[in-house]
Image (cartoon, grey):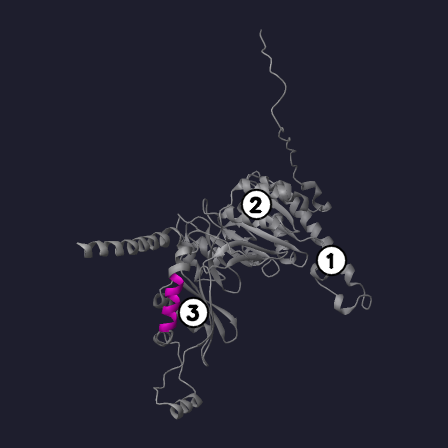
């Protein structure tokens, strides 16, 4: 009887710890990874690294010098050489391992074995990135970081660097307008496309940037951002006039650049520039981001007059996409579908949009419109996004790289509040003054109860 009581007393804490670990693995995966997953994975990685690399075909024959030294100093068996481990760094979401590739290997060899490495080391995913020639980094994630989005504590920051979402490798997805000036965002309804744009707008609102909106849904998406917008168009007629003003603004910026260049000899060679970033800080115009919501509304026509206006707007958008980067004008084009069936100029405009973000879509051709021409292998990933994961998307660019991302939820009220708080940062652009949205003045809330007693009116 006493032995049974002793066994019961000893098994109680063990059952409690096991139950707590199982609960944390489901409800708090970050805690489970830090306490249990990381130590187990580190031990498994250290113990099986050589054999796993050999089984995955990531080893090479040793050099002749290594063979001679081994035979001269010991009688050990000469084995193939795996990539050398240069650094192992644990993170809150996984494990990062930097490898020096063996002679004759390339990063594609390691990337092709990522799925086998994931199963061998028991992690959620393994991503391979190139650090420099001959050095790659394995980014292992211990759990699905997109299930519950938590942005990194210290994401990259800068004047035109905006952290928007979380990648599936645990790093921040950043819109860098100096590198990727224009972007196309696609997705059907209720996929998180609007939440993505809210995060982008609030990130830009805190920076020295002019925001211009075209929302042909009568402004229901962008009107709450009015305190921070330098211009807003809510129908195709206004959009056409606004695009003309943007072209005038772009031409004025090019005139400024040309005047700064001067005649040969009047400006030092190191100060000659072909874009606004080479201008002195006091003369440099503020960067401008144009956000077009539901771009298909600009293409749809009902009459001949509408068709002429459509062709004119598309031409202006293409000019902005081709020439706007040097003038500090960037495009964010959003829609549910974007292809040649929209009309003349649609394909040419899409070719100018370097960045691509595709949320869940209803058919494969829509995913191919956004990703097929830059990352064909990402099309399947875009069509396999689950409906219960709103905000999940596939992001790619013209380099061919792509990754899964998910945007943290941000309500429209919170986004409007940020725009209200940053309204003082809205730059004054005389060219767009006619399109500056009117912001109603809110009456201040009373400080205390009213001292006026109501009187009963009798008739």
Q: Position of residue 97 (x, y in %)?
A: 45, 69
Residue 111 is tagged as: 3
Which quadrant does the C terminus fall into? top right
Q: Position of residue 171 (x, y in %)?
A: 50, 59
Tell whether position 139 is magenta. no
Q: Quadrant of residue 271?
A: bottom right
- Between circles 2 and 1, the one closer to the viewer is 1
Q: Position of residue 272 (x, y in %)?
A: 75, 65
Report which residue position mark 1 lands on: 281
* Callout 2: SS: helix
Q: For the image shown, how many numbered marks are present on the structure? A: 3
- Residue reaching furthest front? 2
Note whether 446 is above or below 111 in the view shown.
Answer: above
> Do tag 2 and tag 1 residues touch (Cβ < 8 Å)?
no
Q: Quadrant of residue 450?
A: top right
The magenta segment is 37-48
Residue 169 is tagged as: none
**283 sits left or right of 135 in the view:** right
* First-in-chain label (2 vs 3): 3
C-alpha span from label 2 to label 3:
42 Å
Q: Quadrant of residue 239?
A: top right
- Residue reaching furthest top? 459
Note whether 338 is above or below 263 in the view shown.
Answer: above
Q: Is residue 222 visible?
A: no
Q: Nearer the viewer, residue 196 or 143?
A: 143
Q: Nearer the viewer, residue 42 or 257?
A: 42
Residue 298 is tagged as: 2
Q: Nearer the viewer, residue 458 or 333?
A: 458
């Amino acid at each position: 009887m006493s032995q049974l009581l002793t066994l019961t007393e000893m098994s109680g804490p063990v059952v409690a710890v096991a139950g707590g670990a199982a609960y944390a693995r489901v409800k708090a995966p970050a805690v489970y990874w830090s306490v249990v997953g990381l130590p187990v994975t580190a031990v498994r990685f250290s113990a099986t690294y050589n054999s796993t690399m050999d089984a995955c075909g990531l080893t090479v024959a040793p050099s002749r010098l290594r063979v001679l030294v081994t035979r001269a100093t010991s009688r050990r068996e000469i084995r193939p050489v795996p990539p050398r481990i240069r650094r192992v760094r644990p993170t809150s979401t996984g494990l990062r391992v930097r490898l020096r590739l063996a002679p004759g290997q390339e990063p594609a060899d390691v990337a092709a074995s990522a799925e086998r490495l994931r199963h061998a080391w028991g992690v959620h995913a393994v991503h391979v990135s190139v650090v420099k020639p001959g050095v790659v980094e394995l980014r292992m994630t211990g759990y699905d970081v997109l299930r519950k989005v938590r942005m990194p504590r210290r994401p990259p920051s800068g004047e035109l660097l905006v952290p928007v979402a979380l990648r599936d490798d645990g790093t921040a997805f950043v819109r860098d307008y100096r590198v990727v000036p224009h972007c196309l965002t696609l997705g059907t309804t209720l996929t998180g496309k609007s939440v993505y744009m809210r995060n982008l707008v609030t990130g830009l609102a805190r920076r020295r940037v002019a925001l211009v909106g075209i929302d042909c849904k009568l402004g229901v998406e962008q009107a709450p951002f009015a305190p921070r917008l330098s211009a807003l168009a809510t129908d195709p007629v206004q959009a056409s006039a606004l695009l003309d003003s943007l072209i005038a603004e772009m031409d004025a910026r090019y005139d400024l650049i040309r005047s700064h260049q001067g005649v040969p000899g009047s400006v030092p060679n190191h100060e000659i520039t072909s874009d606004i970033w080479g201008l002195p800080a006091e003369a440099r115009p503020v960067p401008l981001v144009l956000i077009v919501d539901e771009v298909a509304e600009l293409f749809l026509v009902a009459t001949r007059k509408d068709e002429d206006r459509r062709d004119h707007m598309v031409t202006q958008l293409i000019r902005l996409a081709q020439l706007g980067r040097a003038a500090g004008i960037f495009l964010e084009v959003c829609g549910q579908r974007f292809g040649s069936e929209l009309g003349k100029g649609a394909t040419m405009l899409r070719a100018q949009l370097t960045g691509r973000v595709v949320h869940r879509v209803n058919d494969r051709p829509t995913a191919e419109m956004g990703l097929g021409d830059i990352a064909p292998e990402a099309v399947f990933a875009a069509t396999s996004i689950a409906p219960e994961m709103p905000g999940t998307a596939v992001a790619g660019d013209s380099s061919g790289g792509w990754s899964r991302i998910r945007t943290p939820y941000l309500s429209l009220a919170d986004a409007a509040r940020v725009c209200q708080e940053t309204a003082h940062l809205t730059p004054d652009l005389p060219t767009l003054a006619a399109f500056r949205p009117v912001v109603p003045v809110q009456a201040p809330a009373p400080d205390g109860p009213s001292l006026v007693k109501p009187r009963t009116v009798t008739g």
